[in-house]
């Protein structure tokens, strides 16, 4: 007989956050698909950040979306293939590219905002606004703490 597993995932806050985030993304993807849009939640976040700030570099966009270089490149490749975003060489630094929404990309963001709001309203219907505000503050506190923590050392 095996000893009980020494860690309870069901009571781990990090697991609960990750599990809920995954479920929210799956539901948003279904909402996009049901409305006839071939957009992933990851692409949606990139489109939103570009809508807010046209001309970000890939590095800046990765930082603002919490995506690594490989992921942001893959997402941008897909958005470019859909003619929703385009990369342009930076006039002052030829090693760098700046990212812009196309007119179709801007239109899509504007079209999806009501859908995202409706999905969020339904997903959070049982959570009072003050609890949502409290949750945002808690998550911001966790992020601040994570930013202050030293990077773990690689075992040699």
Image (spheres, helix red, strand yellow):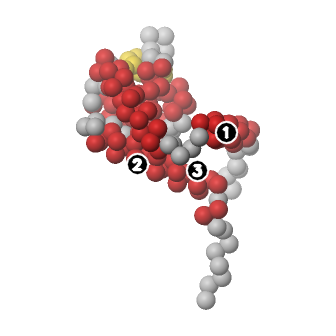
Of circles 3 and 1, the one toward us is 1
Image position of 59 (left or right of 105): right
Image position of 103 (left or right of 65): left
Task: Please give the name of the residue rendered at 64% of the width and 67% of the height, measured from the top-left corner.
Answer: 8
Residue 105 makes an appearance in the image: no
Between 112 and 118, the one nearer to me in the picture: 118
**Residue at the farthest bottom position:** 1
Q: Quadrant of the N terminus?
A: bottom right
2 above or below 112? below
Cβ atoms at labels 3 and 2 below 8 Å apart: no
The image's mark for residue 134 is 1
Cβ atoms at labels 1 and 2 below 8 Å apart: no
Mark 3 neighbour density, 10 Å: few (under 14) some (14–19) many (20 or more): few
**Residue at the farthest top position:** 91
The location of residue 63, given as percent across then percent down, is 55, 31
In primary-sequence order, the first of circles 3 and 1 is 3
Mark 1 neighbour density, 10 Å: few (under 14) some (14–19) many (20 or more): few
In primary-sequence order, the first of circles 3 and 2 is 3
Task: Please give the name of the residue rendered at 45% of the width and 17% of the height, measured from the top-left corner.
Answer: 55
Residue 128 makes an appearance in the image: yes
Cβ atoms at labels 3 and 1 below 8 Å apart: no
In which quarter of the view is residue 118 placed? top left
Task: Please give the name of the residue rendered at 71% of the width and 39% of the height, measured from the top-left corner.
Answer: 141
11 above or below 147? below
> Helix, strand, or loop for circle 1?
helix
The location of residue 154, given as percent across then percent down, is 67, 52
In which quarter of the view is residue 33 placed? top left
* Residue linked to disc 2: 26
The location of residue 139, given as percent across then percent down, is 65, 41
* Residue linked to disc 3: 17
Give how far apart the Cα atoms at labels 3 and 1 are.
Answer: 15 Å
């Amino acid at each position: 007989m095996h000893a009980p597993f020494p860690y309870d995932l069901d009571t781990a806050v990090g697991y609960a956050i990750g599990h809920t985030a995954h479920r929210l993304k799956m539901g948003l993807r279904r909402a996009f698909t049901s409305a006839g849009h071939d957009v992933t939640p990851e692409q949606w976040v990139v489109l939103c950040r570009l809508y807010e700030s046209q001309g970000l570099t890939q590095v800046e966009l990765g930082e603002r979306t919490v995506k690594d270089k490989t992921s942001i490149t893959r997402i941008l490749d897909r958005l470019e293939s859909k003619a929703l975003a385009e990369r342009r060489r930076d006039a002052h630094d030829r090693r760098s590219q700046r990212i812009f929404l196309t007119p179709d990309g801007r239109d899509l963001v504007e079209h999806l905002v009501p859908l995202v709001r409706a999905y969020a309203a339904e997903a959070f219907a049982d959570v009072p606004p003050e609890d949502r505000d409290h949750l945002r503050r808690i998550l911001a506190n966790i992020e601040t703490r994570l930013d202050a923590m030293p990077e773990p050392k690689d075992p040699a």
